[in-house]
Image: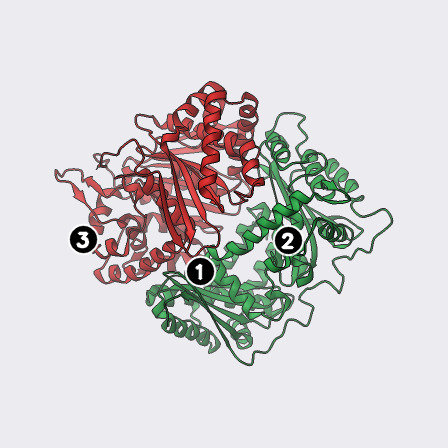
Amino acid sequence: MDIKTVKYDKIGETLYIYEHKSGLKAFLIPKKGYSKKYATFATHYGSINNEFIVPGEENVTRVPDGIAHFLEHKLFEQKDGSVMDKFSKLGSNPNAYTSFSQTVYLFSCTDKFDENFQLLLNYVQNPYITEESVEKEKGIIGQEIRMYEDDPNWRSFFNLLGAFYKSHPVKIDIAGTIESISQINREILYKCYNTFYHPSNMVICVVGDLEPESVFEQVEKYIEHSESRDEIKRLFPDEISSLNKDYVEQSLAVSTPLFQMGFKDDPKGLSGFETLEREVAVKILLEMIMGKSSALYNELYSQGLINNTFDFDYTIEENYAFSMFGGESPDPVKVRDIISSKIEEFHKTGLNREDYERIRKAVNGKFLRRFNSVENISHLFVSVYFRGVNIFDYLDVYDKMNFEYINEIFSKHFNLSNLALSVVKPA
Amino acid sequence: MSNLLQEETVSKIASFDGIDVYTIKTDKFKTSSINVFFHTNLDRQRVTKNALIPAVLRRGCRRFPTFQEIALHLEELYGATFDCGVTKMGERHIIQFYIEFVSEVFTEEGSKQFDKAFDLIYGIITQPVLEKGAFKDEYVKQEKENLKRLIESRVNDKMQYAVEKCLEETCKDEPYGIYDYGFVSDLRDINAQNLYEQYIAMLETYPVQVYIAGSASDDSVEKAVEKLKSLRPKTGGDFGDLSDKKLSGPSQDSFNKSVTEVRNVVERFSVNQGKLSLGFRTNTRPDSKDYYALLVYNGILGGGVHSKLFQNVREKASLAYYAFSRLEKFKGLMVVSSGIEIGNKDKALEIILQQIAEIKAGNITDYEFESTLKTIETNVKSLRDNQLQIVTHYLGQSIANTNDTFDDLIRKTSQVTKQEVVDVAQKIQLDTIYFLTSKEQA
């Protein structure tokens, strides 16, 4: 068995890699002394993949919004009942989630890892979908959609994506709408499954106190496909580089207005490693400009314009990227205006090198802390993997990071004509 | 037992002036943490001020007089995290301070991470920025406004709100019915002077627990203990300690409440989805043998995908995306909650009550029972992988007057029989039905 070992002594971690003949790669990050073992089996397929060409076909397939998420729900159903029951008997916690670009199946357990792992590998490879169970699921997912309709944070997030994007499917709610899921049937679900759930489009990541040989032997034994396959053509509409809108608002049952705002970015042409560099740079910049130690944060806070809920993040994938920051505020428009003028000032006066040095150290420490938790490691691993990199590449990114690059990304990303604001107001 | 992983156990290393200091030694994490808990009773008179105290303290201390300077210092400590706030555990109100920082092995030689982190948290707690012998007026005014908004914005998260509000309604006329962050109407009379007075009372008289988790050296911990000896006034204060009978805990008679009539509470918002929550009295104390049977009961009813609520409300009837039950062990409460189509309220209520009746009648399948025991075991073992959860576990043990390690907890639940679950089920009484619904619903 050909197992590759990479040691990262600086942070005391090791990565084991095994490649299956189907093209699937499996990874193990051992965590000595941890009780919990966490395994994920993920496909490079999420809510944005609603238009594609199946390998071997000529025609474009267009599927209803929310189908990747629907399929995630349906995979739990097996010929002999729900696979959840089998995990429950083993006392483990099965789960799954669908993001814009991935569907991730996972379990955590403290005992009987092999049986749990075999179960995970088996059910994800063997769907059993009936018309009846599809109809039943529409009721459950319908309530999931309703729950999100009443969630002001979720709404302000998606409303902002709607302000950024004119046509890119990232603006569509991951679960779709009650209307779009009503069009889903067994046949379309199988078509999506057969297209996106080939091992060559998937990854396995295991984190916990385990031995690589025994984990990878199971991968070898239970992955059913033996041949690699041609690539899937994923189609996306042309997206404008400017904003769709610069302001959107909605009324909901909230006491204080909530807002999200951010800059639309353009990641086209970046390699996987470059997306990591961009991500770390923008996160350092956000800390420098509006983090808790910044003059801007403290000014907004002492004026009562923001509170503890204020937070920020940056998202980057192959064909969309954006920064986002927000929280509760009595006057989101004023917050935007103050942030805008501060950024304008930085464009004129330049950034402070000392701030950069201090924050780089802090951001690096926070990255290290993510290795405390087996679920954090797994989530981060899977979230960057399909960009062609792995989480340990962040270490190189931190080593190479420098003030000149930070300045370059500042001019590129913090362009005020790309700044949009989304507000949720009290009804 | 030899194949079990070594436990993350707690040791009490010092006890003086109503302050107990514990260490939880482990080097499996990249970070270490210091947690400080001030204990008091939940009551209307003090709750809002208690909530405001940490909010004002976090704004600055003598060495770092502004929030910005504290933030800068945290960044220098390799991105350490500091947080504080209040919580309720039963009718105990707890003011908590917490700092987590990268352990020394992962930092440059000689950077005394633990000592610096301890000095910071100790400084924030004990040396606030003062103005005319009281808190700084500007900080108090701003934090009053922030607290007002925090209390008001509870309704933003309807799922959590429906759970908390249901339990508050269940205990409407008891201390537990008080929200941990207090009352907007009580803010008006709070000023820098009277808030400072309550802060001094906190510092001088509230029992304190300090938990140091991670890989700090004995030497550093010893120095920290020395510093803690000056927390209380030199003259010797009237501080209580954790065994104080005046402190709320499960030993009080607030526990057994017989329900004479089920209350119905309806609250209306502009929403698409209804949230149905049911508040129950378990009549079971956390320091009784029955408590372990109650844990299993809760697991069978709504503690996971194998549970009766998940299987029947969601999987069979397709009425909901989520349906669960949860215990509030320190006050003997249980809450059931589910998000449903507003028109389906009666149907959902019927199915939920049916599940409760089933357990009472002894209808528990082997699958439900075995899965519950295993799920509890997994969940308890998993607590050990999270520093904060390890600390919270031991804090909870001290409030419940129990002394269970993780292994004890697993062992005692694994010995519970079906009959014991059925017995405990007989004691559980529905108290309040809370429905969060739309403005249009009749």
Q: Do we see residue A168 in this rendering?
A: yes
The residue tagged 3 is A187
User: Is A284 above or below relative to B125?
Assistant: above
Give the camera-side residue of B120 and B251.
B120
Residue A302: image tag? none
Residue B215: percent from left, percent from top: 65, 38
The residue tagged 2 is B51
Residue B48: percent from left, percent from top: 64, 56
Q: Chain A is drawn in which colour?
A: red
Chain letter for green? B
Q: Residues within 10 Å of mark 1 (few under 14, many from 20)?
A: many
The residue tagged 1 is B304
- Judge left or right: residue B50 versus residue A265: right
- Judge left or right: residue B46 versus residue A409: right
Q: What element carries label 3?
A: helix
- Which comes before the other along the chain, label 1 or label 2? 2
Image depth: mark 1 or mark 2 in front: 2
Which amino acid, mark 3? Glu
CA separation in Å, label 1 and label 2: 33 Å
Q: Give the color scheme: rainbow, by chain, secondary structure or one colour.
A: by chain
Q: How crowded is mark 3: few (under 14 residues within 10 Å), some or many (20 or more)?
A: few
The chain letter for the residue carrying disc 3 is A
CA separation in Å, label 3 and label 2: 56 Å
Residue B401: percent from left, percent from top: 69, 62
The chain letter for the residue carrying disc 1 is B
Task: Tell me, yes or no, whether dots 3 and 2 are on the same chain.
Answer: no
Say which residue appears at 52% left-offset and 64% top-offset: B165
User: Among all residues in the image, which is located at the extreme top?
Assistant: A404
